[in-house]
Every structure is written in C-alpha cells, then in structure tokens.
Image (cartoon, helix red, strand yellow):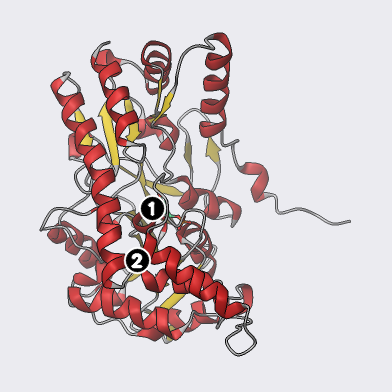
Amino acid sequence: MFKINENYQKLPGSYLFSTIAKKVAAFSEANPGKEIIRLGIGDVTQPLAPAIIEAMHKAVEEMGNADTFRGYAPDLGYGFLREAIVEHDYKPRGCNISADEVFVSDGAKSDSANIQEIFSAGNRIAVCDPVYPVYVDSNVMAGRAGVYHGESGTWSNVVYMPCTMENGFVPEFPKEVPDMIYLCLPNNPTGTTITKSQLQEWVDYANRVGAVIIYDGAYEAYISEEDVAHSIYECEGAKECAIELKSYSKNAGFTGVRLGYTIVPKELKCGEVSLNQMWARRHGTKFNGAPYIVQRAGEATYSPEGKAQLEGQVAYYMKNASAIKNGLQSAGYTVFGGVNAPYIWLKTPDNMTSWEFFDFLLERANVVGTPGSGFGPSGEGYFRLTAFGSYENTLTALGRIKGL
Ligand SMILES: *Cc1c(COP(=O)(O)O)cnc(C)c1O
C-alpha cells in the first residue's frame, strides 16, 4: 500500500490569512454599513505599466503568426532576458554575473521553496524570526526541520535568528552553526534592511563556517538608502557562498503575471560539485520554462520607458509608505520599515498582543493589517501594514487610526 510523505503531516495549519479573512467576514456581516480598508496582504494594486502591456501585446501577435510562433521556451530562460538581467541588474552594480548563471523562473516563491532540494536532507537551516513562511515550510516538507513545538511556535532543527527592536532588526550570527542561511533583504515582514557592510559580515561569516546563503531580493527595487546593497554579489566573496532570488512581482506588479529568476554562481561549489550545474539539471528536469510572452514582458521592464514607469509605481507605493510611517509616528506609535521596503512594522501600543491590536484596529478603525506573531514568535507585539493600497485609501485609513 502506498504511503504519503509524512513530513506534510507535521505542518501546523497555516491559519494566518484564513483567520484574518474569517474575522473580517464576521465583522462585515455584523457591521454592514462599515467600509473596511485592507492594508494587510502583500499584493500590488497598480495595473501593469504601458511599456509592459505593449511588449506583451507584441508577443501575443508573434504567437499568432507561423513565422514568429514559439513553442517550449529554453528551460533556463530566453537569452534576451538573461542578457538583459546581467546588463541592467548586475553590471551597473559592479557584479560580475554572466548569463549562464541566471535561471529564469515563474517567481521567487517557487524558487525559494525549491532551492532546498539540491542540498542534503541533513543540513541545518537558519532563518530570521519573524520570517516569510515559505523558507521554513518547504524545509519541513523535505524533512529537514525536526519536530514542531506548538507552544513556542518553533521547529527543533531550525536555527532562529530573532530580529526585534532590541537588535535593530539585524540578524545576529547564531550560536549553533547552520549549513543554510535564509536572508530576505529588504525584509518582509519587518520592512527593515541592513547596510552593505553588515551584509558583507554575513558573507564573510558564511564563507568562514562553510554555509550557503539563500538571499531573497524580492524588494530590491524599494531600496532608497545609499549604503544598502542591491545585490548580495556587491559583497566580496558572495559568489562563493550565495544564491540570489529575484522576482518581478513587487517591482513591476507581476504577482499575477509570474516571473522571477535565480542566480547560482559558477564559483559556488561543494567540494568539486558545481551548484550551478546541479540547479541547471534540476530546472531542466522539473521546469519547462517561463512563457515567451511573460519573458518579453520581463525584458520590457528594462527598456527606458519601462524603467521610468516602474520607478513611478515604486514611488507611488513608497509615498504611501512614508505617509503611514510619518502619520503613525506623529500619532505616537513606534514604527519601523517603510524606507527601503513597502512594509511598515509597528510596535503594538499598550503591550497589546499582535492579535489584540488586529481586533482593535478592525473594530475601531475598520482597518485590516497583519499580526506580527503570524510570521514567527519574535513577531509577537508587532503589526504589519502594507503600502500597496491606493493613496486615497491609505490616507483614509491613517486618518481613522489617528482618531483612535
Ligand atoms: C512577494 C515575495 C516574493 C515574490 O514571490 P513571487 O513568487 O515572485 O510572486 C518572494 N519573497 C518574498 C519574501 C516576498 O514577500
């Protein structure tokens, strides 16, 4: 008789967003006249930029013509996109990345979940706490996380690096040496980031202890400060220890279009074994390429018009972010993030738990956010608001919160 992968049974239910949805639905039903503003979910709201739509239309036409029709895309991505990535995302930053180190995919969520499978089941992972849940759950499914302790909300074989007010949201080197380190910078959910020299210390640490860094750069486009690295490969020695994940979801609004890429440098080796070749093999076996139309859309993000339009979109969201940050600060809240990322991470007032503050905000201001404790134990006592709403709704929500 068949058996299932028992590791799936170890996963605790993912109650965060379903609990939020249930609470919001119950509130709406009880208060039909109240207009609720959602600043909870990390999804974009602005439509695709005109340069991208134009490129997609053109690609659609090509697909309808026998001379220009394309079937399966190359497993690892079309040359035009891989070259554009090198030219625009790496060369200007002084990063020596070549096109055969770029692996085009359908997004960073799948890459961040899949990348663990080229590593030993015996490896120990380290994650920031709070954390984007995919890193941990994908390792649970692979049998790498150990046993779940419901009370502490932690896994026995995962090394947690708390990121809190006390350490300025900068992860510290863990006491137990991990094999794989997940870093998401700028960070979801805290909206904070670290300086390039702090990142360099992590690269040096990984090279010293023989760990690999899985670096999620999904929010790179939101960096506004000078001393923050746009790629981990700006750090010396990163090609020997780091894999970088990128996504077009947050910089170009591709959450529904689906496109991302992963960099696996040729210098990254385990003994004589090249991880670049392993990932090429994995990708070639399990992935049949991102759609041609979508890869053309990705290419259009690098055209002069595309770049200008996307800068405008990012600026729009960051205007929301500063409005939230400044507004809450003037109302007496302790607020983090919102400078290099579209997330505001606030300390709940009066020692409320994250969920108490959720209920308070929903009932009194009719505003929905995300309880920090949903991202890990160190998120307790914090709360996330996103800048992805409309400017008008953001201001209305703020006005209500200030009036509490
Ligand atoms: C949104 C997000 C991504 C992007 O995921 P896609 O699958 O590319 O849409 C990756 N990592 C983090 C931390 C995110 O918040």
Q: On screen, 396 above or below 103?
A: above
Q: On screen, 216 above or below 54?
A: above
Q: Find disc 1 in the rendering and name its residue.
A: 126
Q: On screen, 174 above or below 404?
A: below
Which quadrant is home to the N terminus? bottom right
Q: Which residue lies most toward the left here?
A: 226
From the viewer's perspective, tell me whether residue 30 is left or right of residue 382.
right
Q: Point out which mark residue 93 bears.
A: none
Alpha-carbon neighbours of circle 2 within 10 Å: few (<14), some, or many (≥20)? many
Q: Tell me residue 231's x, y (percent).
A: 25, 66
Q: Amino acid at mark 1?
A: Ala
Foreground: 120 or 62?
62
Q: How many marks?
A: 2
Q: Which residue lies most toward the bottom here?
A: 67
The residue at 35%/32% (across/down) is: 379
Looking at marks 1 and 2 on the same chain, the residue that comes earlier in the sequence is marked by 1
Q: On screen, 195 above or below 316?
A: below
The residue at 44%/81% (across/down) is: 276
Q: CA distance from mark 1 to mark 2?
A: 10 Å
Q: Amino acid at mark 2?
A: Ala
From the viewer's perspective, tell me whether residue 202 is left or right of residue 197.
right
Picture quadrant where residue 54 is located: bottom left
Q: Is residue 281 visible?
A: yes
The residue at 39%/76% (across/down) is: 264
Q: Tell me residue 90's x, y (percent).
A: 26, 75
Picture quadrant where residue 284 is located: bottom right
Foreground: 102 or 123?
102
Q: Is residue 172 visible?
A: no
Foreground: 64 or 238?
64
Q: Are the residues at dot 1 and dot 2 in contact (C-beta closer than 8 Å)?
A: yes
Q: Find disc 2 in the rendering and name its residue.
A: 211
